[in-house]
Image: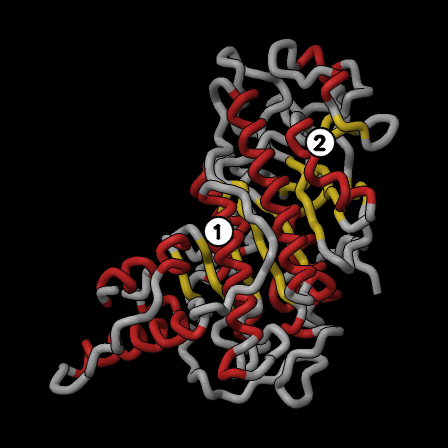
Amino acid sequence: MKRRDFLSMTTAASAALWLPRAFGAQAQVPGQADGTALARGGYGNLLILVELKGGNDGLNTVIPYADPTYYQLRKNIGIKREQMIQLDERTALHPALQPLMPLWQSQQLAIVQGVSYAQPNLSHFRSIEIWDTASRSDQYLREGWLTRAFAQHAVPPSFVADGVVIGSAEMGPLANGARAIALVNPAQFIKASRLATPVSLHERNPELAHILDVENDIVKAADRLRPREGQFPLKTNFPAGAFGTSIKTAMQVLAAGDTLQGRPLNGQGVAVIRLTLNGFDTHQNQPGQQAALLKQLAEGFASMKSALVELGRWDNTLVMTYAEFGRRPRENQSNGTDHGTVAPHFVMGGRVRGGLYGAPPVLTQLDGSGNLPVGVDFRQLYATILGPWWGLDATAVLQQRFEPVPLLRA
């Protein structure tokens, strides 16, 4: 594999992918007196973020079927009652989410409804920037919220990297400082057998040498997460398609991290993995598009759970969806939905206290723009990760106190 191809695949040409601290720097996080991740806390608890890029339509995902206004607003695209998967006396799931039901029934899947932020922005670019930086709608921050977290308490040097971004060149919450690797082409990453030898810096000028130093560190780190001959022992079958391949790559990253240097490291590969499922900007012909996307999401989550169980990581992994916004409650004239405000988000894991959380939609109480009011600030989800999950000072990272959502078991 040519070096320039790998750098393109990992977007390693940017020195901004790395926090300016040495890999060998000493790091200590809560519950980690010797810098080793513990199953009960700290960065031994893995976070997997799944971006639903484009803004998923929440009302056809988690459906308030008992509210007659739902069908008044969605005469053409509303999900038929007989097709829904009923959760309780007023809430149902889209039929394509059937693969999530074992997780729901085992109470390992939480659904947080009404998630957004005050004065929401309906621009894709600006709103995802707000989510990625955990800023207010009128505030502009440079670093991703995870970058700030890792600056506050560094990931131990035994970890290959702070995080891995799979299937996207955008670093999102890991932007501008985190030790993060972007695997833009996960299928190519799995298929490649080895990397080219890192480039020599001999006779390079100092400015170029610094950039190439960074590139070489990224190449070396990514190589430590690359599959070796016979190293991927999982029996889990992953769904076909880009999202299924991204999930398989994520599980390979974990499997490789567990066996670095020929010894078990209890998952000390990375602290966070981010995946992206594209296509949720459904302005036209939404029913078929969203059904296919939700099917990918549900089948992907089911395979992810299976693989995490095989790896012994299910109880110390938290999986959470996020997106820049939801969709409007009223359908448009193209059998689609336009940019809206709130949306439900899924959280799953072996230590998740399953059930419905947040604010269920009340469709008779739309604001002047025809949108639902905010029920849960998205930074409450981040506070749940930073505080109860990792044991960090969430207020310092988020620059304001947010109450965690009580969806984790002790």
Q: Residue at left 55%, top 53%?
A: 135
Q: In what element is the residue under mark 2?
A: strand
The quadrant where residue 197 appears: bottom left
- Please indicate whether residue 44 sits to the left or right of residue 388 in the image: left
Q: Is residue 357 above or below residue 133?
A: above
Furthest-right residue in this view = 89
- Quarter of the image with the C terminus is bottom right
Q: What is the C-alpha distance between the residues marked 1 and 2?
A: 25 Å
Q: Position of residue 146 (x, y in %)?
A: 55, 64
Is there any visible trace of residue 193 in the rendered image? yes
Which numbered dot is residue 4? none
* Residue 62 numbered mark, or none: 2
Q: Position of residue 211 (x, y in %)?
A: 25, 74
Q: Circle 1 is placed at which residue position? A: 246
Pointer 2 local density, CA inside 10 Å: few below 14, some 14–19, many at least 20: many
Q: Nearer the viewer, residue 300 or 398?
A: 300
Considering only order in the chain, which callout, 2 or 1, is on the residue closer to the N terminus?
Answer: 2
Does 285 appear above or below 115?
above
Is there CB contact under 8 Å for labels 1 and 2? no
Instruction: Classify the position of the N terminus by image quarter.
Output: bottom left
In this orientation, which residue lies closer to the viewer: 371 or 79?
79
User: What residue sits 68% from the left and 28% below the top?
Assistant: 94
- The answer to which of 378 and 406 lies nearer the viewer is 406
Residue type at mark 1: give it.
Answer: Ser
Quarter-wise, where is residue 154 in the image? Answer: bottom right
User: Looking at the image, is 73 positioned above or below residue 131?
Assistant: above
Residue depicted at 32% across the width and 58% down the height: 9
**Relative image position of residue 249 (x, y in whole percent):** 48, 57
